[in-house]
Amino acid sequence: MKIRIEIDDNLKEEEIIIRCSELNDSIKKIQQNIMETSKKTNIVFYKENIEYYLPLDSILFFETSGNGIDAHTINDIYRIKNKLYELEEILSNNFIRISKSTILNTNHIYSINKNLTSSSIVQFNKTHKQVYVSRGYYKAMRQRLDERRNYES
């Protein structure tokens, strides 16, 4: 595979062209990664009267609570003003909906306790926090994890 970068001062918008003999899984993954990387995600996090600008990779999961959406890190909880459906549209592929009320960052999964009759439990490293994966969302999460593992290997 060859990679060529051309710099053109006259361009008003960046353009990426992929030339290939066929559209295979490898090319689709490259396209998906480019699309994910180019997403501009500006989420402001709030705690009391202070605004925080955190890296999204520090977020374990987003969860609805009584009066909004909470963003959980290993040690803290922040409030955000976005809705879950908005987050699904703007977050990278590392995040996936696992229930009606939760979006999970798959980069932070430590273990999954699969339960065939009810919700499975996801645990995170270095924290007591855990989330439940609804049975209806489990298969999609499993596929996403398998895709990522296959892509990384």
Image (spheres, rainbow, N blue to C red):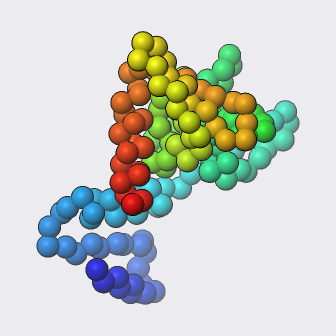
Residue at horizontal 66%, vertical 20%?
65
Looking at the picture, how far across and down is residue 42, in whole percent?
61, 50
Looking at the picture, how far across and down is residue 40, in whole percent?
53, 55
Left-right relation of 12 to 16? right
Measured along the vertical axis of the image, is residue 53 above or below residue 78?
below
Residue with the most extreme right position = 49
Q: Residue 66, can we see it? A: yes
Residue 101: which quarter of the image? top right
Figure quadrant of the C terminus: bottom left
Looking at the picture, how far across and down is residue 92, in whole percent?
49, 49
Residue at horizontal 34%, vertical 64%?
30
Left-right relation of 14 to 66? left
Which of 94 and 91 lies nearest the eye of the viewer?
94
Which of 146 and 30 lies nearest the eye of the viewer?
146
Residue 116: which quarter of the image? top left
Left-right relation of 109 to 129? left
Measured along the vertical axis of the image, is residue 51 above or below residue 12?
above
Left-right relation of 136 to 42? left
Q: How many labels sit on residues?
A: 0
Figure quadrant of the N terminus: bottom left
Which of 50 and 128 lies nearest the eye of the viewer?
128
Residue at horizontal 69%, vertical 35%?
72
Residue at horizontal 34%, vertical 72%?
16
Residue with the most extreme top position = 117
Q: Residue 78, can we see it? A: no
Residue with the most extreme left position = 21
